[in-house]
Image (cartoon, rainbow, N blue to C red):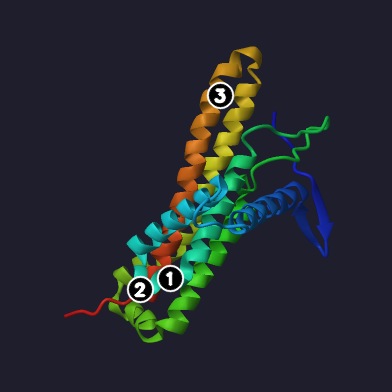
Amino acid sequence: MEHKVPEFEWLGFHFDASALMMIGITTVIVLILAIAGASRASVTNPSKLQNFMEWTIEFVEGIIGSTIGSKHGKGFIALGLTLIMYIFIGNMLGLPFSIVTEDHVSWWKSPTADIAVTGALTVIVIVLSHFLGITRNTKHYFAHYFEFKGAMLILHLIEVVSKPLTLAFRLYGNIYAGEIMISVIVGAGWFGIAPLFVWQGFSVFVGAIQAFVFTMLTMVYISQTLIHEEKH
């Protein structure tokens, strides 16, 4: 059964109350993990959370090193770490359970199962990448558009426009489809218990992959506008 979205209107705009609530919850969880992992850090006796955070940072450094490079990428570690933690945790929130009222209004879901949320994340990434290209690599940023002529220029502009669309819809589509499948399996009653555990395990894998892909593509887009390879 299709669930309703709890909406409210403010200044003529309609807002999804459940999406805003889940965005806030995801933000709080990320902040708590970051603060807890950084506080009481020890070199000789690190906690399990500290070890996890250090592994996550090294993982993000690996992503940045393979896309932007260690020389240009040091300043983007915080961005990559924030994205991968926020998206992964957001992807996971809708897995364990859902909160639906008697009038079929859904209050608990993954924030990334909302196209407005993934679209907003994508806008931030795309605007940031072009801003960095314009401010830090001005000459080559504008010059590369003149490398294409005729039909190739049109195809290149289509590629520029399609990047944010694919980035937003890929994340949204995978997470939203996963939550739909969970609701279908739950509807099967007792017969759905075993498939539910299997699907939730698969959903954790998909959620982790999507967080990785979004972060990876973010760094790729930044590298494309920020780094210029000299032609010989």
Residue 214 image position (x, y, % from top left):
47, 54
Residue 62 image position (x, y, % from top left):
38, 58
Q: Are marks 1 and 2 in contact (CB under 8 Å)?
A: yes
Cα–Cα gap, marks 1 and 2 = 7 Å
Cα–Cα gap, marks 1 and 3 = 40 Å
Q: Is residue 216 left or right of residue 114?
A: left
Residue 119 image position (x, y, % from top left):
58, 57
Residue at image position (30%, 75%) is 148
Work out which residue is located at the far bottom of the displayed protein and give it: 139
Residue at image position (66%, 21%) is 187
Q: Is residue 60 left or right of residue 101?
A: left
Amino acid on which the number 2 mark rests in the picture = Lys
Secondary structure at badge 2 equals helix
The mark nearer the N terminus, 2 or 3, is 2
Q: Which residue is mark 3?
A: 197
Vertical arrangement, residue 155 with respect to residue 25, above or below: below
Q: Which of these two is toward me, 220 or 157?
A: 220
Amino acid on which the number 3 mark rests in the picture = Phe
Q: Which residue is mark 1?
A: 74
The image's mark for residue 71 is: 2
